[in-house]
Amino acid sequence: MKTRVKELRSKANLTQQQLANLVYVSSRTIISIEKEQYSPSLMLAYRMAEVFGTTVEDLCCLKENRELEDQREDL
């Protein structure tokens, strides 16, 4: 799943480890989310959204991801 985690983390001048510490996960989890290899749980997405002062919808690009999923279903 596409997210804005890397973009928002960079803007906030946070390392992957710093973000991981703030949201109580390992840096590997943050790396996997940024590489779109892992989708965050709702609670993790909420915690990250709070750190960045945004919404879960914005952080996780929910509209864009839903449209991509809808396109796949149409095939």
Image: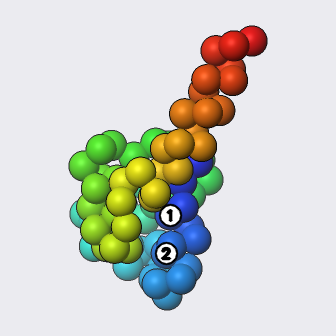
Q: As displayed, is residue 63 above or below residue 27?
A: above
Quarter in which the N terminus is drawn? top right
- Residue 59 visible? The answer is yes
- Name the foreground residue: 29 vs 44: 44
CA–CA distance in space, label 1 to label 2: 6 Å
Q: Residue furthest right?
A: 75
**Residue position for label 1:** 5
- Residue at 59% x, 43% y is 64
Residue 38 screen position, x and y as percent: 50, 43
- Residue 55 as seen in the image, left or right of residue 43: right
Choose between 61 and 19: the one closer to the eye. 61
Residue sitting at 61 percent across and 53 percent down? 35
Give the crowd class for mark 2: few <14, some 14-19, many >=20 residues within 10 Å: some
Looking at the rendering, in which quadrant would you find the C terminus? top right
Q: Amino acid at mark 1?
A: Val
At label 1, counting other C-alpha atoms closer than 10 Å, the crowd grade (few under 14, some 14-19, many 20 or more) is many
Residue type at the position of mark 2:
Arg
Which residue has dot 2 on it? 9
